[in-house]
Image (tube, rainbow, N blue to C red):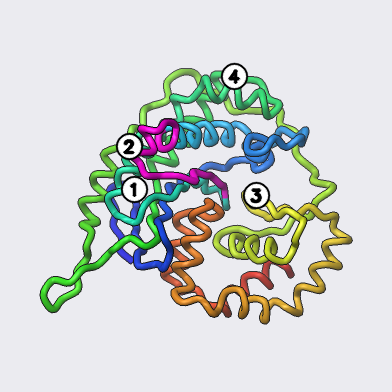
Amino acid sequence: MLESKESQLSLYVAGGVPVGDVAVAVSFEAACDSCCLNKLRCGSTCECFCKGSEEACICFALYMEVRNALCGSPLAVQKSKADCVCFGVNDNMFTIAWKTKSKASNAKISLNMALKKLRPGAVYSTYAELIRRCGGKPDRECFNYVADKILKSMQKSIEVGIVGSVKTHKKDGNKVVPAIDMKDLAKKLHSKLVLEKVDGSKSEPKGHKECEHKEYTELKASGWEAGITKDYLESKMKGHTVKMCNKYLLIDMKEPKWNTFSDKLKGKINLDVEQKYSKAKELAPLLGYMLLADASVSCGDVRQMINKNVKGSDIVKAIKQVLS
């Protein structure tokens, strides 16, 4: 894996993964409410308006900007070679991810197009419509407060990950050297950021209504462990949904039914993991690609997975910990 950093932008490229394309993603800190994001994603009828709804609406607006830049027209698709643009939030890290063709140049072009759109103070008109859909009222001062908070997190840290079949090394005589000038790439990507100051009066949002999730079961989980547990449960819970929320997994079962179901699962985890995961070559990069491609985890989580070289035993431990 190749890594580099330019100011607050950290970048890594994990290549040679036996897949047909490349997953590209950008992550930054934002404490988004997952119920609000689910309303915006799929029209959930939840009546709550939780703390973090304003962050969710701004981040969803940024996702829409990036999606439109990459795939909003035939010309955009022709230039970016991107598709499957998606988003997610995990442990207060908001991630926008997409796929593109298996060349470093395609990843670079799509990132150039996406990074220009990360301007939290410039999406008020979209935010106003989104906040109404989530049960709130648009307020410019509240927007300024939250947009400025997200801006400051971007000024502190932005993570960029590229994982897939991209070529990262080449032969130079008898030596194997990097095929990508990471320092130059990080510098050029950083130059595309337009982190404008959020002007105007600011006021912290208030009047939130928390969600009780009476019809669901919440499993406390975050990081790559949450992503892999979600993937595992979805393969075992046919006909049910497992939603990735900020700091937990949300399962569409009441707790008594879930407790009975999970008790049956616990004795099979070792065998299930052996069959589903452990036979794959390059397991850690493959899992990183899968989870990053659908924005289940942040760029930092995938970096951690690959550096740790996650194995079947690590997956068993993670799933058991979440289900315990």
Q: Which residues are magenta?
A: 69-89
Dot 4 or dot 2, earlier in sequence: 4
Q: Residues within 10 Å of mark 3 (few under 14, many from 20)?
A: many
Q: Are marks 4 and 2 in contact (CB under 8 Å)?
A: no
Regarding mark 1 in the picture, which secondary structure is present there? strand
Q: Is residue 26 magenta?
A: no
Dot 3 or dot 1, earlier in sequence: 1
Q: Are marks 1 and 2 in contact (CB under 8 Å)?
A: yes
Relative horizontal placement of residue 218, taking residue 224 as reference (left or right): right
Q: Residues within 10 Å of mark 2 (few under 14, many from 20)?
A: some
Given residues 163 and 82, the one toward you in this image is: 82
In the orientation shown, which residue stands out farthest toward the left?
Answer: 173
Residue at the disc numbered 2: 193
Q: Are marks 1 and 4 in contact (CB under 8 Å)?
A: no
Which of pointers 3 and 4 indicates the residue nearer the eye? Answer: 3
Residue at the disc numbered 4: 139
Q: Would you identify the image quadrant in which residue 139 lies? A: top right
Question: Residue 144, how many percent across, how many down?
Answer: 50, 24
Residue at the disc numbered 3: 245
Q: Would you identify the image quadrant in which residue 75 lies? A: top left
Label at residue 9 = 1
Amino acid type at image mark 4: Asp
Residue occupying the point 82% across, 55% down: 253
Amino acid type at image mark 1: Leu
Q: CA distance from mark 3 to mark 4?
A: 26 Å
Q: Compared to 16, does 77 lie above or below?
A: above
Given residues 324 and 241, the one toward you in this image is: 241
